[in-house]
Amino acid sequence: MALSTSVQKACRLMRVLSDQRNTRLTDLAGAAGIDKASALRLLDTLVAEGFVVRDESSKAYSVGPEWLVLRATSVHRIDLRAVVRPALIRLAQSCEDSVILSVPSGQESVCIEMRPGTFPIRANYLNVGSRRPLGVGAGSLALLAALPDAEMEATLAAIIPTLRRYPHFSAAMLRREVAATRARGYALLLDVVVERMGGIAVALHDPDGYPIGAISIAALSDRISEREETLALALRREAAAVSEAWLKPGTKRTSKAPAARELSNV
């Protein structure tokens, strides 16, 4: 049991290390829910094994070469970013706002790709590697709403403790937003994560309808409200284009390709 617990803690440290805001021992221990003594001991082991590196001058931790080898192997098998990237580029160019690709990871969504727009005021509260509980943020909400009912309810029950960090969010509020997302066909959140900022998003599905990612546009709330219908249509079209790219011969993937029929109805 002790070995299993240590392995689990080490995995949690590696997970939170993907967020660029977590570089110091205190930040890593807090984000992983581990006491500092245990975190330091595990980080020392990860450093020795090459999965983590520590800058001696700044004392900051970052991912090491062994982690990058594993990542390269995974990317060789599948890189959802490569398939979705053209859609992100087109959306960022046409809407002039930041466009984000998020994927589910347990009870969280993780930002794995971002394309900034040219509009002077940008959404800068998400970076590649940023994590949020499912439902917190437009892309994250799109993922939550796309889950089967039983899994969605189980996820809500699991994330309730983490919602304390987000004063505008609650299980009841997320249930309402999930219902609204399913009814309109896209997720929309304005002024709830960050004041005056918002997001609009659609989920990407596999052939069975299970969410494997979400594309979202983050911008000033007014900019989204004024163009809601246009942005939603653009997101749907790009989701269909992603589906078509997945289905092309030779496309590398680890899971089944999303069906154009399903994505066009998101």
Image (cartoon, rainbow, N blue to C red):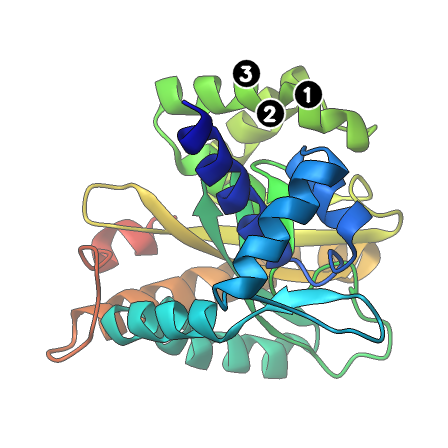
Mark 2 surroundings: few (<14), some (14-19) or many (≥20) residues within 10 A: some
Please state which of residues 75 and 170 is positioned toward the viewer in this rendering: 75
Give me the C-alpha separation between circle 2 and circle 3.
6 Å
Q: Residue at x 82, y 57 (%)?
A: 222
Q: Is residue 175 above or below residue 166?
A: above
**Closer to us: mark 1 or mark 3?**
1
Please state which of residues 157 and 57 is positioned toward the viewer in this rendering: 57
User: Which of the labelled discs sits on residue 159, or is there none?
Assistant: 2
User: Residue 45 is drawn in which quadrant?
Assistant: bottom right
Q: Residue 5: horizontal and vertical position, in percent? A: 48, 29
Instruction: Report which residue position mark 3 lands on.
Output: 157
Mark 3 surroundings: few (<14), some (14-19) or many (≥20) residues within 10 A: few
Amino acid found under the numbered disc labelled 2 = Ile
What is the secondary structure assignment of the residue under circle 3? Answer: helix
Mark 1 surroundings: few (<14), some (14-19) or many (≥20) residues within 10 A: few
Q: Is residue 42 above or below residue 98?
A: above
